[in-house]
Amino acid sequence: MSSGSEISSYQDLKVWQEAMNLAEQCYELTQGFPKDEMYGMTSQIRRAAVSVAANIAEGHGRETTGVFVQFLRIAQGSLKELETHLILSQRVRLCSVASAAPSLERADSLGRMLRSLIRSLQKRGESV
């Protein structure tokens, strides 16, 4: 990193780091899902979780703050999709409420981080 708290890479972003932690947690959770869900809910949860981190990284690599904000909003959408898959997994008994709770709590926290980052970037007046 250059000076102080400057961000030299998307990997320096706390929001990206937390998105990666959530994706890892979701991979671990879905390891316990039935094998016949490999191409169903397991795949959906993993894809949505990876999408959150990937959109943060891709947006950071773009030219403008406005486009970054757009990708952060896409990441928010993927996060809501992930939460929905996790809740449905509980409802259809692919996992227990207790086993999904840590991922849902982390997703909620990450959603607040994303909203805060978006507001911060918009306040700079650099967004489109």
Image (cartoon, rainbow, N blue to C red):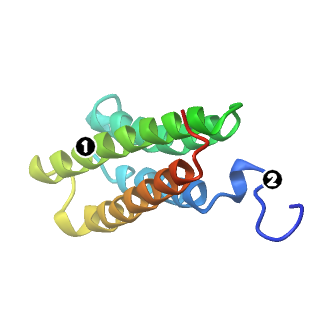
Residue at 44% x, 56% y is: 28
Residue at 25% x, 43% y is: 85
User: Which numbered tag is attached to residue 119?
Assistant: none
- The quarter of the picture where the N terminus appears is bottom right
Residue at 33% x, 53% y is: 32
Q: Secondary structure at mark 2?
A: loop
The single residue placed furthest to the front in the displayed view is 125
The single residue placed furthest to the right in the displayed view is 2
Rounded to the nearest angstrom, the CA distance separating label 2 from label 1 is 33 Å
The image position of residue 57, as x and y in percent, is 63, 41
Which class describes the residues within 10 Å of circle 2: few (<14), some (14-19), or many (20+)? Answer: few
Question: Tag 1: residue type?
Answer: His
The image position of residue 67, as x and y in percent, is 58, 32
The image position of residue 9, as x and y in percent, is 76, 50
Above or below 97: residue 24: above
Nearer to us in this view, 126 or 60: 126
* Quadrant assignment, res 90: bottom left
The image position of residue 122, as x and y in percent, is 51, 48
The residue tagged 1 is: 85
- The quarter of the picture where the C terminus appears is top right
User: Which numbered tag is attached to residue 8?
Assistant: 2
In the figure, is residue 69 to the left or right of 107?
right
* Quadrant assignment, res 36: top left
Nearer to us in this view, 53 or 64: 64
In the figure, is residue 88 to the left or right of 53?
left
Nearer to us in this view, 88 or 61: 61
Above or below 71: residue 105: below
Choose mark 2 or mark 1, whichever is in front: 2
